[in-house]
Image (cartoon, rainbow, N blue to C red):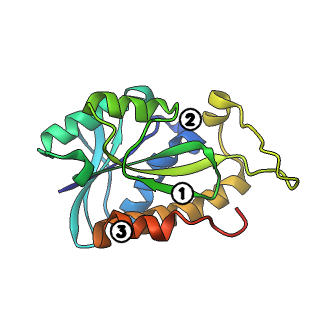
Amino acid sequence: MKLIIGLGNPGIEYQFTPHNAGFLAVDRIAESCNATVANRRGRALTGKATLAGHEVLLAKPETYMNLSGLSAAALVRELEIPIPSQDLIVIYDELDLPLGTIRIRERGSANGHNGATSVSGALGTEEWLRIRIGVGKPPLEDGREVKAGGTDYLLSPMRKQELAVLDEVLDRVRSAVEAILARGVSAAMNEFNRTVEGS
């Protein structure tokens, strides 16, 4: 069974914040599979689904972002996943990527993301597949970058306009997960890591 974990914070007040992009992606995948993510196991809300011919367990840790690794490690153990790099996909927000973009990576540093740091620490490796959802501000028309204000920004509700962009991105994340499961990570990276026109 493949394990797909979206990172975020539990609680209605965090639901539509940039930091919960991973939760929203898991919800979108569940919705497309007619699955419900409501069972409690491994310190997460989980739901089973079939995606691209694979049985998957969708999970949203209930530990809060900074302790996401506790849930990830518990689920990896419970599902007896011997090599996380093959059977685990973690989806989370990335401030360094502009809103409207996604990036698939097979491994790497957490880049200051506390949830990703927690997952790497708990698993004892940075070798796990991740899909990062851009939540950063797009550059200004003159090309200058706008630095979004860290924690305050990540935990503040997104505006309607931003949610409309994210809505389209969540469909792309679902397609990226399907591509990884159906055709492998290299093919998925070739398709989804290209820069989208206008972003």
Up-down relation of residue 24 to residue 121 (above or below): below
Q: Which quarter of the rendered picture does the N terminus lie within? A: bottom left
> Residue at 35% across / 68% down in the picture?
178
Q: Secondary structure at mark 3?
A: helix
Q: Which quarter of the rendered picture does the C terminus lie within? A: bottom right
User: Residue 138, can we see it?
Assistant: yes
Query: Disc 2 marks which residue?
Result: 13
Query: Disc 3 marks which residue?
Result: 178
* Label 3 to label 1: alpha-carbon separation: 14 Å
> Residue at 56% across / 61% down in the picture?
169
| Label drawn at residue 7 | none
Q: Is residue 117 left or right of residue 145?
A: left
* Label 2 to label 3: alpha-carbon separation: 30 Å
| Kind of residue indicated by mark 1 | Ile
> Residue at 43% across / 33% down in the picture?
115
| N-term mark: 2 or 3 | 2
Query: Disc 1 marks which residue?
Result: 102
Contact flag, marks 3 and 1 (Cβ < 8 Å): no
| Kind of residue indicated by mark 3 | Glu
Q: Is residue 97 left or right of residue 71?
A: right
Q: Is residue 64 left or right of residue 42?
A: right
**Foreground of the two, 195 or 165:** 195
| N-term mark: 2 or 1 | 2
Q: Residue furthest right?
A: 142
